[in-house]
Image (tube, rainbow, N blue to C red):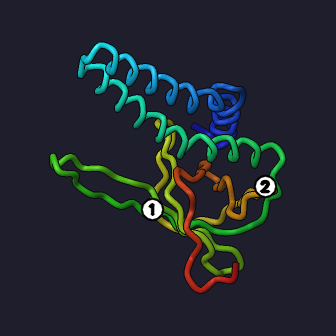
């Protein structure tokens, strides 16, 4: 998938009210199932409520970054920088292997931010250092979307400012 196709897909998927309604909707769903469990004393409802609460937490963590990335593509101030992409693997308690894509964002040769990226099914970045355009929006201190020649990246969680940098 080309960079332009990735931009179009993110803009289409991240626009609208779906992401704005997903978090509160999952919270209401969790509350409804918890109430159903309390009234019926059926533990299945409590399990469903727990799953909906976990979903609500995941949406709450990711949805703002998707909306910010779309805003950054549309109206963000773009600056030149670089991204160093790396992958980290780990095993959970059941020996399932998980992998995360992380990046070190630099401007003027100084590393400023460390972030974990959302990876899409249509483009898998490769490890290495790449020149990039960093898009910033008002009210967010880190770059909300990183554009390389091959694809775009945006944070999955709140990025971490590198130690020793002025704030």
Q: Name the residue at the top extreme.
A: 40
Viewer-proximal residue among 63 and 4: 63
Give the residue drawn at x 57%, y 77%. Answer: 162
Give the residue drawn at x 55%, y 25%. Answer: 25
Secondary element under disc 2, as helix, strand or loop, is loop
Query: Disc 2 or disc 1, which is closer to the eye?
Result: 2
Quadrant of the snapshot with the N terminus: top right
Q: Relative to 30, say whether 41 is above or below.
A: above
Q: Earlier in the sequence, mark 2 or mark 1?
A: 1
Q: Name the residue at the bottom extreme.
A: 164
Viewer-proximal residue among 127 and 50: 50
Q: Which mark is residue 80?
A: none
Identify the residue under disc 2: 137
**x then y, percent, for residue 37:** 32, 20
Give the residue drawn at x 39%, y 60%. Answer: 87
Q: Relative to 44, say whether 113 is above or below.
A: below
Quadrant of the snapshot with the C terminus: bottom right
Horizontal relation, residue 107 to residue 155: left or right: right
Q: Name the residue at the front extreme.
A: 39
Give the residue drawn at x 17%, y 51%. Answer: 93
Identify the residue under disc 1: 127
Viewer-proximal residue among 74 and 165: 165
Horizontal relation, residue 156 to residue 12: left or right: left
> Which image quadrant is residue 13 in?
top right
Q: Residues within 10 Å of mark 1 (few under 14, many from 20)?
A: some
Q: Relative to 31, say whether 53 is above or below.
A: below
Measure the C-alpha gap from mark 2 to mark 1: 27 Å
Q: Residues within 10 Å of mark 2 (few under 14, many from 20)?
A: many
């Amino acid at each position: 998938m080309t960079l332009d196709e990735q931009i179009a897909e993110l803009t289409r998927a991240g626009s609208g009210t779906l992401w704005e309604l997903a978090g509160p909707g999952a919270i209401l769903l969790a509350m409804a199932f918890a109430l159903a469990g309390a009234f019926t004393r059926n533990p299945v409802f409590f399990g469903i409520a727990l799953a909906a609460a976990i979903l609500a937490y995941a949406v709450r963590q990711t949805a703002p970054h998707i909306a910010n990335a779309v805003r950054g593509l549309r109206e963000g101030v773009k600056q030149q920088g670089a991204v160093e992409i790396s992958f980290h693997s780990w095993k959970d308690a059941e020996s399932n292997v998980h992998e995360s894509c992380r990046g070190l964002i630099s401007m003027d040769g100084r590393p400023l931010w460390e972030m974990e990226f959302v990876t899409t099914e249509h483009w898998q970045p490769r490890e290495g250092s790449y020149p990039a355009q960093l898009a910033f929006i008002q009210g967010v201190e880190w770059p909300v979307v990183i554009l390389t020649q091959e694809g775009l990246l945006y944070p999955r969680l709140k990025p971490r400012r590198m130690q020793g940098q002025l704030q």
